[in-house]
Image (spheres, grey):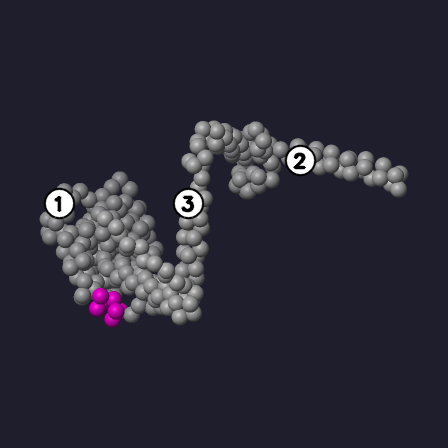
Amino acid sequence: MRTLILFIFPLVLSCNLLQEEEQHAATIARVGDDYLYLSDIAGVVPADASPEDSTLVIDNYIQGWIKEKLVLKKAEENLKDNQKDFQKQLDDYRKSLVIYTYEKELMKQKLDTVVSQEEISAFYEENKQNFELRDDIVKVRYLKLLKSAPGVKKVRKIYQSDKEKDVEKLKELAHQYAEKFHLDDHLWIVFDELKKEVPISVSQNREYLKNVKNIEVEDSLSYYFVRINDYKLQDDVAPLSFEANNIRNIIINKRKLKLINQVKSDLYQQAFLNKKIEIYKTPKNEK
């Protein structure tokens, strides 16, 4: 029996030494009693990184880890115990996360996210005063073509036309030759966003939109063709179509709140009836 123990002891000792050597070999850095291991940086380097970039990423990660540990240790040494006690904050944070996750699952299962056009229109009519425009908006068709593009002359000829055959031809030319284009002239867009795309100089949007309908400008490389079909100015009531998505989100959010409040109320009533809750004394506000 003693011989067996003597045989096993060196074997266990050698295994432990081997494990320590392997662990030491996998150690990248140390700060006090904290160690950074090779396994800790798995996934840090992007798969397509070059060897030089990989080395830089790893070096930066190690330096960041060391500095963070040093600051943490200094903070632990210098802060009072009550300043380091975050248990209440952690408990509150955990409760918030659990409730948020539960409510999110509840929304997936029970929330009706289908909003009819009638509901959107009714909400809009009831709340028109809340839908004042913050920006000037326009309905436009817009094309940008290189000056060398074969379709420039044809686009110049028909981009202002409302004839169905011309509109269809313009779409065809846009897909063939345009660098950029926007041909949905039923869709409202912010005028300042259009000005970022088209090199036009406008000091007063209001006067410009009142007086200009068709725009053709150029820069060193391209021609820009713009047809303004309609406009509304800042502080006007926003069109329904411009606010439709916003209204849809408002209605869905109202449903969320209603569902959450209903669930809370149902849980309270059920728990009260089952005698799972009791209020022993209502605190009085003593002045």
Q: Nearer the viewer, mark 1 or mark 3?
A: 3
The residue sitting at 87% across, 41% down in the picture is 4
For disc 3, the marked residue is: 89
Q: Nearer the viewer, mark 2 or mark 1?
A: 2
**Residue 121 in the image, given as x and y percentages of width and height:** 22, 67
Residue 193 vs residue 171, the one in the foreground: 193
Per the rendering, the mark at residue 204 is 1
Three-letter residue code for mark 1: Gln
Q: What is the distance, in whole Å, between disc 3 and disc 2 at their CAs?
A: 36 Å
Vertical placement of 167 versus 85: above or below?
below
Is 59 magenta? The answer is: no
Q: Residue at x 12, y 49 (%)?
A: 206
First in residue order: circle 1 vs circle 3: 3
Name the quadrant containing residue 219.
top left
Residues packed near mark 1 inside 10 Å, few (<14), some (14 to 19) or many (20 plus) = few
Q: Report the Cα–Cα distance between label 1 and label 3.
A: 52 Å
What residue is shown at x 29% (from left), y 63% (from top)?
254
The quarter of the rendered structure image containing the N terminus is top right
Circle 3 SS class: helix
The residue that appears at 60% across and 36% down in the rendered structure is: 37
Amino acid type assigned to the residue bearing label 2 in the image: Gln
Q: Earlier in the sequence, mark 3 or mark 2?
A: 2
Q: Which residues are magenta?
A: 117-123
Report the front residue among 111 and 149.
Answer: 111
Residue 25 horizontal side relative to residue 211, left or right:
right
Compared to residue 270, the image places residue 223 above or below, namely: above
Q: What is the number of the mark on residue 114?
A: none
